[in-house]
């Protein structure tokens, strides 16, 4: 981060309107570098205000300009902000492209730990969003956490830690959350954020949809107010729904779907549809019968008649081909 941008970022009084005034003033005085620094900060402010469309427009123009003068430090900062804006606009392809450009430039020069941490954090967020690759995302979040911790940026370190714990929950390793939280470096960041993730992990371990919903109600500010967690809410909710159904059907070999829906407290059609999807995805082996019964098997039962039918079709195909060849010779 350039000295001028660093000074600008440390001015809490610099609102959107004041920043725009400073940009106009720098333009009138023909101070190009100062104007670009204020514009870079304006992109950051627009992202904070969740005005992502305006942020992308300004960032795109500024990137073109900065590439011409080869201001790498400022360029990395603007490309990162552009990636963040594209992510929130759900344009993951462009978010990835902007981040890749930022990382390429950052790798060609010395990059301060704080900026490297921001790049790692965004990399983790995109890996989680694009491919649901939470295993790789965890590695990036961990790198970001350590870097933020080293520069004493407690707020960003706490965010990285939250996403680390979310990654463990999403990879079905909720039991590792407690062991992570007892670490010497991590324990100092304990608070509502970590309490929320701990409660979420406990709900996942118990496979309890009720506890999951209660956690989101209790820790709404820490979970639903976080845009990254919010984007994964439906995926987490769907996973917890599957875990709850798996827990409920585990003792049975045959059970009424109506009974399962009452236990879950959800509509029968919704439960039946989810069970059907789980069977197709081979989350468990079973079948749904027309009389409202779910039959669960210990392992997949392969009907030998299917294999015999395939062999018969193959044999008939060979016979037809042979008859076709003979018919050609007769002609």
Image: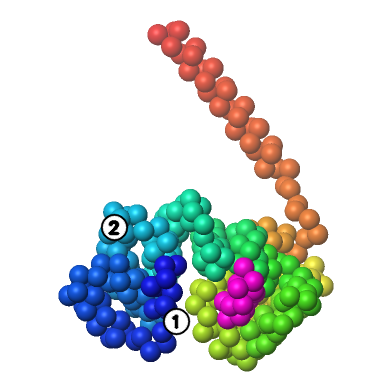
**Residue highlighted by disc 1:** 10
Is label 1 in a helix, a strand or a loop?
A: loop
Disc 2 is placed on an element classified as helix
Mark carried by residue 64: 2
Residue 187 seen anywhere in this rendered image of the structure: yes
Q: Nearer the viewer, residue 88 or 275?
A: 88
Left or right: 298 with respect to 76? right
Magenta-drawn stretch contains 158: yes
Q: Which residue is at 42% across, 61% downward?
A: 73
Q: Determine if residue 205 is in view.
A: no
Magenta residues, as a range? Answer: 147-163
From the top left corner, tell me how far across and down residue 4 is, in percent. Answer: 38, 73
**In the drawing, does residue 76 fall left or right of residue 28?**
right
Identified at 69% across, 61% down, the residue is: 283
Q: Main secondary structure of the magenta part?
A: helix
Which quadrant of the structure image shows residue 8?
bottom left
């Amino acid at each position: 981060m350039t000295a001028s941008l660093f000074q600008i970022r440390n001015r809490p009084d610099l609102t959107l309107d004041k920043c725009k005034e400073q940009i106009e003033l720098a333009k009138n005085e023909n101070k190009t570098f100062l104007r670009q620094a204020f514009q870079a900060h304006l992109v950051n402010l627009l992202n904070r205000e969740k005005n992502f469309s305006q942020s992308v427009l300004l960032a795109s123009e500024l990137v073109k300009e900065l590439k011409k003068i080869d201001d790498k430090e400022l360029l990395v900062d603007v490309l990162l902000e552009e990636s963040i804006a594209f992510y929130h606009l759900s344009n993951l392809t462009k978010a990835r492209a902007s981040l890749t450009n930022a990382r390429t430039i950052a790798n060609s020069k010395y990059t301060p730990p704080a900026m490297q941490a921001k790049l790692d954090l965004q990399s983790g967020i995109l890996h989680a969003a694009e491919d649901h690759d939470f295993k790789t995302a965890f590695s990036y979040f961990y790198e970001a956490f350590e870097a933020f911790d080293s520069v004493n940026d407690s707020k960003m370190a706490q965010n990285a830690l939250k996403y680390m714990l979310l990654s463990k929950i999403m990879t079905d390793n909720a039991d590792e959350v407690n062991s992570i939280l007892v670490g010497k470096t991590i324990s100092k960041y304990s608070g509502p954020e970590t309490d929320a993730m701990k409660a979420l992990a406990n709900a996942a371990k118990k496979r309890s949809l009720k506890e999951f919903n209660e956690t989101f109600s209790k820790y709404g500010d820490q979970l639903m107010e976080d845009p990254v967690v919010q984007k994964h809410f439906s995926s987490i909710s769907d996973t917890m729904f599957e875990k709850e159904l798996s827990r409920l059907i585990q003792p049975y070999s045959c059970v009424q779907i109506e009974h399962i829906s009452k236990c879950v407290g959800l509509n029968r059609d919704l439960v039946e549809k989810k069970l059907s999807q789980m069977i197709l995805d081979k989350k468990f082996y079973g079948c749904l019968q027309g009389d409202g019964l779910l039959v669960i098997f210990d392992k997949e039962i392969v009907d030998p008649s299917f294999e015999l039918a395939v062999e018969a079709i193959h044999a008939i195909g060979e016979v037809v081909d042979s008859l076709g060849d003979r018919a050609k010779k007769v002609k």
